[in-house]
Image (spheres, rainbow, N blue to C red):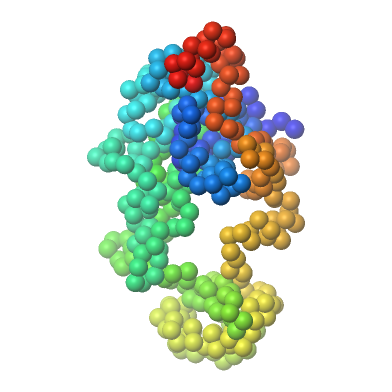
Amino acid sequence: MGRPLDGVTVVSIEHAIAAPFCTRQLADLGARVIKVERPGSGDFARAYDERAQGLASHFVWVNRSKESLTLDLKNPEAMQVLQDLVARADVLVQNLAPGAAERMGLGYAQLSARHPKLVVCDISGYGNDGPYRDKKAYDLLIQSEAGLLSVTGTPQEPSKAGISIADIAAGMYAYSSILAALLQRQKTGRGSHVDVSMLEALGEWMGFPMYYAYGGASPPPRSGAAHATIYPYGPFAAGDGKTVMLGLQNEREWKLFCDKVLLQPDLATDARFATNSQRNTHRAELQAVILATFGRLSAEQVIARLDEAQIANAHVNEVGELWNHPQLRARGRVAEVASPAGPLAALLPPGVHDGFDYRMDAIPAVGQHTEAILRELGRGDADLDRLRAAGAI
């Protein structure tokens, strides 16, 4: 079946996570994504680790279904190859250092005059202007600047998110912004410039704590894996040493929890716990009551009671268990992609569409498609030999 972005060509000068995550999602929808890498080593994320059958875990995650073109962009002939490629493209994505694209003649103002239909997306830590423009920006640094660390962790110590959440946020907003720009181009006939910053992307995700602390009010406290302001909502130990995650959202659920899970219906009207605010204030006392009951049960027995009461709950799984999660398997959400190291499992993108199948093509080797792309652009054997001899490809 045809895909939404069939026929759309994306050229991406990308590395690490934010831009590759954005362009992989465009590839999932059918776009042709040409990934420009350094000759030899390629995207430095290829060397982060060797955990996926010898390949880097980050790279495998965000680079399937792409073509790898190696170019030394300091070489004028290689830069001309890139310019010829951009002339044929619908979208250019880059996450070089701020100002680098303009110095190379790849800024939106420079390109739009020649290619008015081109969509250009710049992804950076802090954006293309402002006093922080030139600061280095890694994921943990943006988590810190955005205040995420202030609300994540335990009361004693802040913690970063366990995944590259700032990169992911920026990649998601770049992806959706490019889709919006392509829709806008259908109406106007012109491309546009998208400037996405990691700080602004993660800042949007910080909306709840920002409003919770609005006007100088106290911010949400760091509360480990528990909810900062709703209780009981978080992890609780069962008697078999396993942990159960549960969450209550309203007073109706609180009464059901007391009656059917704790088997203490009178607790629902205890003045210490009668409202969420009171339960939040008396967390330690309520936690002792809950743990006393759960301590006599296995985790599965606790979950059975919670399910009977229709109280939201979850197993506290390890990362590796997600590949075999019964719900993902039942819905057929685990697929397979080819790679230089052989076939690898891969989760299908979120969202089940009945109108098309996601593209799930191979993860490319460094420079795997260089020769084919150059020949497509009209370069012959002599050109290829010259570029190779110069180390330009």
Give x and y (percent) for residue 37: 48, 29
Give x and y (percent) for residue 164: 46, 50
Q: Is 375 on the left or on the right of 153, as rendered?
A: right
- Which corner quadrant of the image does residue 293 belong to? bottom right
Q: Is 338 on the left or on the right of 179, as rendered?
A: right
Residue 183 visible in the shown view:
no
Q: Nearer the viewer, residue 374 or 150?
A: 374
Residue 313 visible in the shown view:
yes
Q: Is 221 on the left or on the right of 271, as rendered?
A: left
Q: Where 283 sits versus 43, above or below?
A: below
- Which corner quadrant of the image does residue 298 belong to? bottom right
Q: Nearer the viewer, residue 105 or 41?
A: 41
- Which corner quadrant of the image does residue 367 belong to? top right
Give x and y (percent) for residue 52: 59, 47
Q: Residue at x 33, y 33 (%)?
A: 98
Looking at the rendered image, the quarter that the N terminus falls into is top right
Q: Nearer the viewer, residue 40 or 146?
A: 40
Q: Where 120 sits versus 296, above or below?
A: above
Q: Where 381 sits versus 214, above or below?
A: above
Q: Is 304 on the left or on the right of 41, as rendered?
A: right
Q: Where 345 sits versus 194, above or below?
A: below
Q: How many marks?
A: 0
Taking the view exactly as shown, the residue that stands out farthest to the front is: 389
Q: Residue at x 49, y 21 (%)?
A: 393
Q: Residue at x 28, y 61 (%)?
A: 215
Taking the view exactly as shown, the residue that stands out farthest to the left is: 131
Q: Residue at x 68, y 32 (%)?
A: 3
